[in-house]
Amino acid sequence: MTTLPCQQFDELLARPEPVLALAPMQDVTDLAFWRLMTEYGGADLYYTEYFRVHRDSHLEKWILESLVENPTGRPAIAQLIGNDVPSLVRAARELQQYPVAAIDLNLGCPAPVVYRKCAGGGLLREPERIDAILGALREAVNVRFTVKTRVGFDDAAVFERLLPIFARHSLDLLTVHGRTVADMYRGEIRHDLIAQAVAALPCPVLANGNVNSAAQAVATLRLTGARGLMIGRGAIANPWLFEQVRGLGRREAVAEASGEEILDYIRRLYEAVCAPEVRESAQVQKMKKTMNFIAGRADPTGQFVHEIRRVTDKGSFFEVCERHLAGGSRWKNLQGTPNVG
């Protein structure tokens, strides 16, 4: 008998081990990336890129592919972003026709193009509006219902107002990125506020933000008491990270990846996300988004990132990668604390 996604989700939360989720990142964590991540151990829980929801919106086909063709064997959650209540309800009902474990509302995206439209993190300026949206979605969602949030728009003091709202709508899971929208990916993570959410809410809480190594993962769990972690940029830069976190939890030594292993990962990533109909220049451009994370970890001086941003074709792309990674001489300790957000 096939296990339903909701049942998978419930079984995952019932386990004693920390839940490890792959964060949704637009134009990065697509179906091809999910497939590749499973080859490195992968996450326990996957979130789609967000579906843009407004009055004239339709569910994006390329994001739906992640749900229909989910290659991970793990539960997948469909994330929505928007502020129009009827449209969000419509999208949530449509998505429940697909194999989703839960519907998630994005209250954390810090991109100006999003928050200026009062969506994503922009909604954190209007707690009453969030209250209305959550109420409507909770009524419309028959699978699990989750939220991903930041601790405020430009002032974390609002977080105390948000917690009773989250509690009122019987969320099944809350993910908290411990920065404000204005912080973007800079500054310290407010572990104290994540811990406050853990103490205040009846639902499980995942901690998000600045988890770039297994050691940081264990420290974050200790500081917050969270049920698990959502990891994005750290896992993109280091696809072994989820397995490293599991290993450290079992008190196993964490092995470092060599430059050659990272170079192999980049080659596999390039082939995984390469579609025959996509021009080489467009493919290289897409890879640059991922390489911002990988190159920054490989060479904190910034030279690797500087060079990779200027390549325009596959040949020069891999020439730069090989020069910085072949032999492993430039590769930095994966257990360090690089500034990748």
Image (spheres, rainbow, N blue to C red):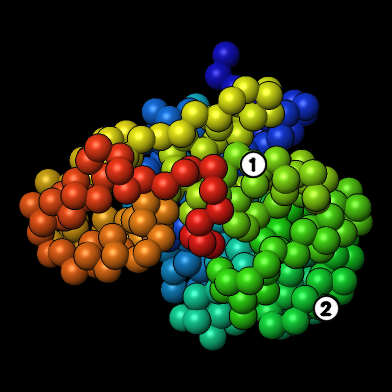
The answer to which of 148 and 169 lies nearer the viewer is 148
The answer to which of 67 and 190 lies nearer the viewer is 190
Q: CA distance from mark 1 to mark 2?
A: 29 Å
Q: What residue is shown with label 2?
A: 157
Q: Identify which residue is drawn at 62% across, 80% down.
A: 182
In-image side of 212 versus 308 (left or right): right
In-image side of 151 versus 83 (left or right): right
Name the residue at the top extreme.
Answer: 1
Res 148 → quadrant: bottom right
Q: What residue is shown with label 1?
A: 215
Give the answer, above or below, for where 291 lies relative to 264: below
Res 161 → quadrant: bottom right
Q: Identify which residue is drawn at 50% across, 75% down.
A: 111
Residue 194 screen position, x and y as percent: 79, 58
Secondary element under disc 1, as helix, strand or loop, is: helix
Q: Amino acid at mark 2?
A: Ala
Residue 92 screen position, x and y as percent: 59, 56
Name the residue at the bottom extreme.
Answer: 116
Q: Identify which residue is drawn at 91% across, 56% down.
A: 200
Residue 276 screen position, x and y as percent: 12, 46
